[in-house]
Image (tube, rainbow, N blue to C red):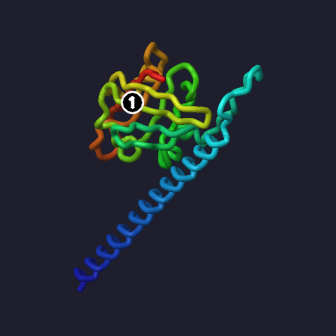
Amino acid sequence: MRKGGLLLGLGSVLIFGGAAFLAVYFYNAHESTSAQKNAKEWLNAAEATRPARPALRTPPRAAPLIHRGDVLGELNIPRLHMSVMVFEGDDGRILKIGAGHIPGTALPLSNGNICIAAHRDTFFRPLRGIHPSDVITLRTPSGAERFAVTGTEIVRPSTGKVLAEAPGRDLTLVTCYPFSYFGHAPRRFIVHAKKIG
């Protein structure tokens, strides 16, 4: 009788634990999908209201203040059928809903190394198939830029040189590696790209 009660209790714990896990998974998936959809709608609306051409002799506008969580744009890699919205920030909350612009690196449509991170098991999973010369588009409310992949590398998480500015390094994508690793991955997979238009 005690053995049967123990098995019944264990079965109940497993069922409720599994149900709780699924509830959290579906909540996170819904939150991520909603954030991506809302960000894309905002970007499309902002792009639609952008003037076709700037008026002549207008003073340059000050760069807008960027806050954590702000939508910066959309990152596309057509050959990989990859599209993800990019938010300001690289903390766990941001990376749960999309890709994150690493603070302190160049902003889109500016000079320097624009660095963007995302999780390897969600938004940046397609990067495992990236090739040199693949084209990456970064679309923002102010316009779009195109980049060509120049190469990839695998580094330790503490290697900060990948975020540094360097000739021909105009966009850097960062995710964990290996892609099939379970848990906190020991390395980082880096994609370097240069601006082509």
Residue 66: x and y in percent read 65, 35
Does 196 sit left or right of 109 as displayed? left
Q: Image height check: is 109 above or below 87?
A: above
> Residue placed farthest to the bottom in the image?
1
Q: Quadrant of residue 141?
A: top right
Residue 65: x and y in percent read 69, 33
Residue toward you, 193 or 45: 45
Image quadrant where one finds the N terminus: bottom left
Q: Amino acid at mark 1?
A: Val
Q: Image height check: is 87 above or below 152?
A: below
Estimate how packed mark 1 is, as few (under 14), some (14 to 19) or many (20 or more) residues with alpha carbons within 10 Å.
many
Q: Secondary structure at mark 1?
A: strand
Residue 180: x and y in percent read 27, 43
Residue toward you, 74 or 51: 51
The residue that appears at 35% across and 30% down in the rendered structure is: 134
Residue hosting label 1:
135
The residue that appears at 54% across and 52% down in the rendered structure is: 35
Does 158 sit left or right of 43 as displayed? left
Residue 136: x and y in percent read 42, 32
Does 143 sit left or right of 149 as displayed? right
Task: Count every numbered label the image shows and give the total.
Answer: 1
